[in-house]
Image (cartoon, coloured by chain):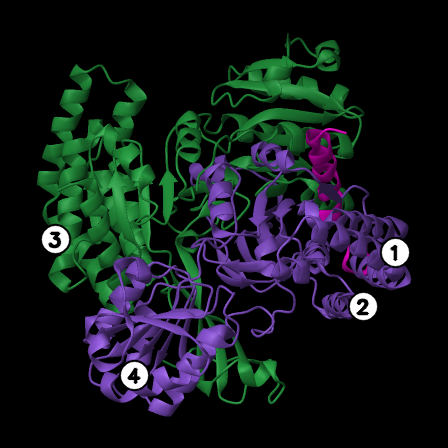
Chain colours: A green, B purple
Amino acid sequence: MSINEMAFQVKEASIRLAATGTELKNKALTNIARLLMERKDEIIKANNEDLQRSKEENLAGPLLKRLKFDDAKIADVIDGINSLVNMEDPVGKTLLSTELDDGLELYKVTCPIGVVGIIFESRPDALVQISTLCLKSGNGVLLKGGSEARQTNRILVEIIAAATDEVGIPSNWIKLLETRSDVNEMLKMDEYIDLIIPRGSNDFVRYIMDNSRIPVMGHADGICHCYIDEDADVDMAVRIVVDSKTQYVAVCNATETLLVHRKVAPRVLPEIKKALDSKNVELTGCDETQKIISVAPATEQDWKTEYLDYKLSIKIVGDLDEAVEHINTYGSGHTDSIITSSKEKAASFMSLVDSGNVFWNCSTRFSDGFRYGFGAEVGISTNKIHVRGPVGLDGLLIYKYKLIGNGHIVDDYANRAKSFKHNKMSKQFPL
Amino acid sequence: MSINEMAFQVKEASIRLAATGTELKNKALTNIARLLMERKDEIIKANNEDLQRSKEENLAGPLLKRLKFDDAKIADVIDGINSLVNMEDPVGKTLLSTELDDGLELYKVTCPIGVVGIIFESRPDALVQISTLCLKSGNGVLLKGGSEARQTNRILVEIIAAATDEVGIPSNWIKLLETRSDVNEMLKMDEYIDLIIPRGSNDFVRYIMDNSRIPVMGHADGICHCYIDEDADVDMAVRIVVDSKTQYVAVCNATETLLVHRKVAPRVLPEIKKALDSKNVELTGCDETQKIISVAPATEQDWKTEYLDYKLSIKIVGDLDEAVEHINTYGSGHTDSIITSSKEKAASFMSLVDSGNVFWNCSTRFSDGFRYGFGAEVGISTNKIHVRGPVGLDGLLIYKYKLIGNGHIVDDYANRAKSFKHNKMSKQFPL
């Protein structure tokens, strides 16, 4: 079957899936969880084949770790599915209701986006999380996984499709693409795919954005900052910077640049250096920083770099405005934190920093769907339209305006025979 | 000044504008209204020069009509500004608040998108409407107007900027681009511009979408449908079809294709033909239609065409499912209406038709920001993410996650020294 035919089938199924009720969707989710458990041994066998082949092909250690899908990870995704069952159905919620005139009622009602195309790295748990989020939100999904995970992906999609077919979810709502050339085909299918969610390297996400007319939800970089203000508690500042930098370095919400107010720098920087030295963090700093602690010189390039490693750049600033300007110039709109005891300065920072997540007196590492209480997430968005920050079900929804009349025509209003009332109601869509 | 410098200045101003309070924004809006009235004669003089030059350049009659900005139109835009003053400030609304743990509180708060690039046709009233919507929603704006209106655009932007400077709105929040080559420069500025709203021909909107990495909010086509179901009231059906087709033909929410259930076709089609003949509407129809009324044969191309004229294509369908499939295949996701006395069929149609606006027993022409009670609108979106349908202030907003802690670090939760509470609160962001 051609990719075009597959995408067409998913599109057709997605229309029916959009009109599928909560009970059936939850029944399907429960059945997926059951079947994953029942066929666990087959899944692990397929995953072992992928692991074996990937080792022979010299896949890097961290990637092998991500590829691995064992008992513990299967238990985790099943937990995730069960919590998704308990979440409220996001589809069909009335966001607004207005009586335009007697008998003419307008409703704004949430609905699925349609077909989501997901291109993901070799994490089988991501496949299950994302496709079950799509199911709960009523979206069809075209998945493109990494070739390293191909045996695991195949059996997972087979199990998910079988479990949903069994309870009567519209067939073909989920399809798996396998080859690299499939991605380029996918990018052209704006007729069938409504949103692409790429997960992977920054370069890859940019490539997708540059080569498709389909809207893309994804983050390009995670250049996050901590800013220590003049009136920060020094102990708190050290704790937060250490956590923001080192709690897990290979992720987008780790801090890459530390900004320090000139007045507090002589007190705080030696403490920071001591704490980060003990974690083997390499430091680079501006001229002023170099006068206070021993660090390598930072270049303009450092301010623009997402290290994703045990490395931190440090810059001393004259005031909050200079910190804000640095962040808005070099940051990536992801997550930035101010450490200060001043409520006014926190308010100003949180208002002026143009990022999806702005924090006061806590670690940038909190920027995460699970920690925010959103359950599973499809990713963290640095987009400025639709959704920002950690994205759960909300990023997979849009709305329709539904208008109910009784023969109403516009000409009566254009000719002033009638006039609009525009009364706000708080009424659920009645059909 | 280069366009790049202009865009940079708007970006800088937009950061400050995002943090500007309601009172000052409303004061600025009131001052714009005052100054437009005060300098009305200058505006009309500039507009007369544009009209004169455009006549000499043989601009088409309907375009001249749109270009004209007289006393009545100035009064209309001033009314619009006054109603905008009375609207609630959409910025700074808390959408969600969660206690993640003791002293660690998460808020989801609305904020402006940043800088909006608007490319608009030669309607001076659109310039005023859109820039005042941007001001109220706290967005900077780069405007590119048609060269036909250049004198009018210049004086309007000068007046708006003077009125806002006078009360202390950050300078440079609004800038006007003038040449056609400026558009192509604008499309490359994804560093400074967060959203482009093109208004103009479908081909033009597509060109913008294909040539920029910046998200585009706009509609491509408006291929709207009326579907007359078997149990429709015939009189009501005729009224609604005539209004949907002829109330104003040159707009995106006018109906282009009529679908009729086979059972009711022999009764309803002769009535429709009689009514539309009296309005000089040209009809094309499928084979079955041709057997009932005298119409030209419709081709596949007719189902895909936005006539924007006194022309309607007609197709007979076997049931509601066939109607839905036709609409989802050939429609443009804009506005579609079912005429039926069955609540169940209306519910099914409104759920299965994949359009931004789905109507029951009323005219497709109601799909409009003013009629929906949204006040002014920046356009009607057929996008499937961010905003759909008529777009008022909501399309110019996004949100930030604001997290307040007291030295909280992630490591405590990763090591299970602490655990998340995730208590829902209903608390406004306190800073």
Q: If you read the primary sequence from the N terminus, does the residue marked by circle 1 or circle 2 appear first? A: 1
Q: Amino acid at mark 2?
A: Asp
Mark 1 element type: helix
Q: Position of residue A324 (x, y in %)?
A: 71, 34
Question: In the picture provided, is B111 more to the left or to the right than A371?
Answer: right
Which circle's residue, 2 or 4, is located before the other in the chain? 2
Residue at 35 percent across and 78 percent down: it is B338
> Which residue is tagged 3?
A162
Position of A44 compared to A207: left or right?
left
- Image point (91%, 62%), residue name: B38
Residue B55 makes an appearance in the image: yes
Give the amino acid type for the residue marked by disc 3 in the picture: Ala
Is there CB contact under 8 Å for labels 2 and 3?
no
Front one among A47 and B246: B246
Q: Are marks 1 and 4 on the same chain?
A: yes
User: What residue is shown with label 2?
Assistant: B71
What is the x, y in percent for residue B197?
A: 57, 49
Q: CA distance from mark 1 to mark 4?
A: 54 Å
Q: Determine which residue is flagged by label 4.
A: B269
Q: CA distance from mark 2 to mark 4?
A: 45 Å
Q: State yes or no: residue B18 in magenta.
A: yes
Distance, label 4 to label 3, CA atoms, is: 46 Å
Nearer the observer, A402 or B73: B73
Q: Are marks 4 and 3 in contact (CB under 8 Å)?
A: no
